[in-house]
Amino acid sequence: MSIQATYLGMPLSIDELDNENLTYFAHCARHDFRLQKCDDCGLLRYPPTTGCPWCASPKATWAPVEGRGEVHSYEEVHHAIQPAFKGHTPYMVLLVDLDTQKGQPSEDEALRVIGNLTSPDGTLAPPDMVRQVGIGTRVRMVFTDVADGLSLPQWTIDGAATQLTKPWRYPQE
């Protein structure tokens, strides 16, 4: 069954033929972060897909993964192209290196999961929180409930983690 929803005024749709994403978001709807783990080589993968990107095996099982990591890269949006997001600027989109499987299959690789920076309740982060985040900031996963059966994995600052004194950020005006 396909999923239709709206997030901040923007339509979302996951087609019934997209089995991997439907399963992924079914776990997220339960606030249960899981990724596919290859049955042959044992590596986790993101985004969900029909075959392992390292060994090409089509066999995988869904494994629980801790949603903690550090910001690998970010985009701070000040001019929203999507009209639904204009009232929420500035907002941040984060690319996070998960602690799980960091440095595999090579020392420069990691599971990298994208999501918005939010407050702990899953709403887009306010500007003062946006200014605190940079490369190396420790974050944890939270879920934004969008509709019945659909929650988006997002990121918030991990208050329990040791943070860098000054994470790297693009120069500010």
Image (tube, rainbow, N blue to C red):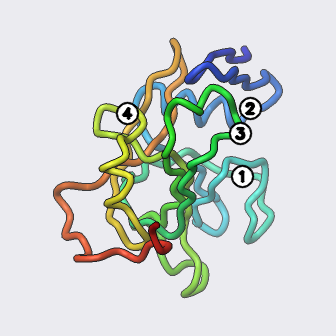
**Three-letter amino acid code of the residue under disc 1:** Lys
Per the model, the C-alpha gap separating discs 2 and 1 is 14 Å
Q: Quadrant of residue 163?
A: bottom left
- Mark closer to the chain start, 2 or 3: 2
Q: Which residue is mark 4?
A: 122
Q: Quadrant of residue 108?
A: bottom right
Q: Position of residue 95 (x, y in %)?
A: 54, 60
Q: In what element is the residue under mark 3?
A: loop
Q: In what element is the residue under mark 1?
A: loop
| Mark identifier at residue 59 | 1
- Mark closer to the chain start, 4 or 1: 1
| Mark identifier at residue 6 | none
**Three-letter amino acid code of the residue under disc 4:** Gly
**123 horizontally vs 73: left or right:** left
Q: In what element is the residue under mark 2?
A: helix
Q: Quadrant of the N terminus?
A: top right
Per the model, the C-alpha gap separating discs 3 and 4 is 22 Å
Rendered residue at 60%/50% (across/down): 36
